[in-house]
Amino acid sequence: MILNHFGVLFPNVKSFSYNVKHYQRQKGAVRFRCRPERDYTMSEPSRDWSIERAVEDMTAIGAFGPGRGFVSFTLDNRHTGQDQFASVVLYGTVTLRDEPDGLRSHQLVIKLKHRTPEMIALCTNDAQFHNEKLFYERIKPFLLDCAQGQDRLPSLCRYFYGRNECGDQAFRDAIVLENECPRGYRCMSGDRKFMDFDHLVVALRTLAKFHGLSYRAKHKASDEFADMVADVKDTHWKDDGSYALPFQVIESLISVCLDRMEERHGGDGRTSRFRAKLSGCGAERLLRTVLVPREPLAVLCHGDFNVNNLLFRYDDHGTPVDALVMDVADVRYVSPAFDLSFFLYMNTDRGTREAHWDALLDEYCAALSECVADVVDVVRVPDRGQVDAEMRRLAFYALVRVSFFMRVMCIERTAFDDVMSFVHKDVEEITRVMLSFGGDRATDLIADVVQHIFDIGAAETVDEL
């Protein structure tokens, strides 16, 4: 299969999320709806398994607190507003008996693996569940202990339970989090493709807090932190060493945008040099080079820090005041610009970058410095000059991801009527289909990103790598 990492490529596509109304037992099978007009039936892995039974078992082992008894679990239609593809996501409410306080309930988000081995492999479910379980059970408590102050903590989901046994018992594997909507968090207001300045600033402050925890951890217990980070699994590269998307496709997607730049401004030599740098194995070599962590700047990055993995809390005037980070399945130890470059290029348009680029990076750097203000004599974080240098070095990575994510963002969800047939296409057909997504509008948006990458001197940095 060409796109063995399809869940990484299209995290916004809702194709295989369970529709609650169709999650029910029907004559020894689990039936669910992939699209409103299409039903899929798969053999049930175990006749004694159900989501209600699974939540009851979680309760029995104390996932929701010691001494609490299971009363009921009800699937509901509450939704965080985030689309999912890489895993099956259910929403529901568990009611518990809590003596002597009586009954209490939790609204849950339950992530399950896909129900066939092919989809599990396609979406790297095993590696992603490993990372989430590792993060919530080991890394997060360690990092929070290093923070030594609530004001330095990013907002994260509350974790209840994780299981990742894989193999023939993979249908039982689950990540269970609290649904944060009752606490006032929701997806960004409106139907905007790009974030405004206020949302960007709040998100960057959260990202700085997330990164800042790593610098404190490396100071407090560097060996212990290194051992945890070493256990993180790579979700971007396949087992055979190849990248999620064939580099021939990546080269074509970027080349079309270089053509658009030349149409706008004529050739100035930079586009031809950049194009030559990507030819052959150049793109793969570049990507591998920039993703090698370099000390002392490397941190544990979120890996997919993007609007679809953020929930915002607003004040009474509708102004965002906090951002909560979701979905840590793609965490990676690398330059902080891994998150920062992708986030800024994916979530801003040309006008915002031209007007606010410096201000946005200043906000990130200021928030990062605040994270270590009490230990500034012994903990160093990158200054603005170092951040700029890392942004130039990681710009190519951001462009690789933006070159296809931006196109996916510009299409209607109905473009994916049959995911599995799409992923079996050859390189030429994948390129043709990908280039059709978003049309000229997407090409213009990505060409704007390339132009900005050139303007900040990242093309020259690429030449030096």
Image: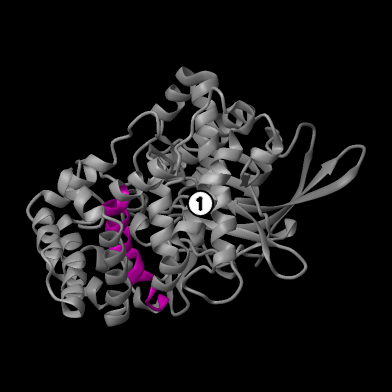
Q: In front here: 191 or 138?
A: 191
> How many numbered callouts?
1
Classify 10 Å Cα crowding around label 1: few (below 14), some (14-19), many (20 and above).
some
Which quadrant of the structure image shows residue 454?
bottom left
The image shows residue 432 at horizontal and vertical percentages of 18, 74
Q: Secondary structure at mark 1?
A: helix
Quarter of the image with the C terminus is top left
Residue at position x 61%, y 44% in the image = 154
Taking the image as shown, residue 87 lies to the left or right of residue 370, namely left
Seen in the image, is 451 located left or right of residue 97?
Answer: left
Q: Does the magenta segment cover residue 410?
A: yes
* Horizontal and vertical percent position of residue 268: 13, 68
Residue 111 appears anywhere in the view: no
Q: Quick one: 164 or 362, which is closer to the camera?
A: 362
Does the magenta stretch mainly form a helix, a strand or a loop? helix
Q: Measured from the top left, where is residue 1 in percent x and y?
A: 21, 56
Residue at (50% x, 58% y) in the render: 359
Which residue is drawn at the image coordinates 31% and 66% (left, top)? 449
Residue 428 inside the magenta-drawn segment:
no
Residue 382: percent from the left, percent from the top?
44, 37
Q: Is residue 214 above or below residue 244?
A: above
Residue that label 1 marks = 362
Q: Is residue 54 visible?
A: yes
The residue stretch that appears in magenta: 394-413
Q: Is residue 427 left or right of residue 234?
A: left
5 vs 72, left or right, is left
Most foreground residue, 358 or 441: 358
